[in-house]
Structure formats: structure tokens, C-alpha cells
Image: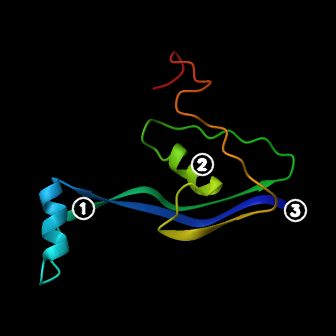
């Protein structure tokens, strides 16, 4: 039985070159876009069984924290779904427990 199921998870951020571009997009009458999309996660799926220990590794900016925040419910995905059997508590604080010699 899976404790956590992540199905086709995608998280897209809209990035603007300046705050002015965000405003221009909001008031644009013709629907012109002034942003580009950044995919922090793109169609990620995984299953974690009860009692299983999992490590999430990757380069800086690869979506590790975004994935964990979505699993914990801190962030909402753009698409996809997370199902958890039980309660998930966020224990990760920025920099807590990290050895700077081991991070990229």
C-alpha cells in the first residue's frame, strides 16, 4: 500500500522581466503575454510505500524543494495530484540540517 502517491505533477511559474511587464499583461486588452514559463516540475510521478525511506537528490534549482512543498500542501501544483495516506508534516526549514560541504 502506498503512503504517498504523486501523479503527473507539474508546477509552472510565470517569470516576468520586470514588475512593469506583469502590469502590462494584466491590463493588456488583446491578451498579449509578457511572461515566459519556467517548469519547476514537469510530469513527475512516484509512489512511496509505508515504511519506505526516500532521498530526493539533484542539482540546485532542479525542483526538490518544490516537490516537497507540494507534497506537504504548502504549494499547489499547476496540474497533477498528490494523495497521502495519513498526515504529512513539514519538517524542512531553509538550511536546517544541511552541510554546506555537500550542497552544490
Which element type, helix, strand or loop, lies under badge 1? strand
Which element type, helix, strand or loop, lies under badge 2? helix
Residue 102 figure quarter: top right
Tell whether 43 sits left or right of 54.
left
Q: 6 above or below 94?
A: below
**In the rendered structure, which disc, 1 or 3, sits on the residue that comes first in sequence?**
3
Picture coordinates of residue 93 (x, y %)?
58, 34
Picture coordinates of residue 50 (x, y %)?
86, 52
- Residue that badge 3 annotates: 1
Residue 90 figure quarter: top right
Which element type, helix, strand or loop, lies under badge 3? loop
Question: In this orientation, which residue lies closer to the viewer: 65 or 20?
Answer: 20
Picture coordinates of residue 21 (x, y %)?
14, 61
**In the rendered structure, which disc, 1 or 2, sits on the residue that comes first in sequence?**
1
- Residue that badge 1 annotates: 36
Give the CA distance from mark 1 to mark 3: 40 Å
Question: Residue placed at 57% from the left, 18% from the top?
Answer: 99
Q: 35 above or below 55?
A: below
**In the rendered structure, which disc, 3 or 2, sits on the residue that comes first in sequence?**
3
Tell whether 103 sits left or right of 56.
left
Question: Residue placed at 17% from the left, 71% from the top?
Answer: 25
Picture coordinates of residue 29 (x, y %)?
12, 83
Question: Residue placed at 21% from the left, 63% from the top?
Answer: 35
The numbered dot on residue 68 is 2
Crowdedness near tag 3: few (<14), some (14–19) or many (≥20) residues, C-alpha within 10 Å: few
Amino acid at each position: 500500500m502506498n503512503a504517498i502517491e504523486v501523479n503527473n505533477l507539474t508546477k509552472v511559474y510565470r517569470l516576468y522581466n520586470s514588475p512593469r511587464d506583469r502590469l502590462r499583461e494584466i491590463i493588456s486588452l488583446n491578451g498579449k503575454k509578457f511572461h515566459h514559463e519556467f517548469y519547476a516540475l514537469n510530469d513527475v510521478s512516484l509512489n512511496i510505500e509505508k515504511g519506505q525511506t526516500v532521498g530526493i537528490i539533484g542539482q540546485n534549482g532542479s525542483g526538490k524543494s518544490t516537490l516537497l512543498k507540494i507534497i506537504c500542501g504548502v504549494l499547489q501544483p499547476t496540474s497533477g495530484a498528490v494523495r497521502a495516506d495519513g498526515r504529512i508534516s513539514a519538517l524542512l526549514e531553509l538550511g536546517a540540517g544541511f552541510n554546506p560541504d555537500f550542497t552544490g
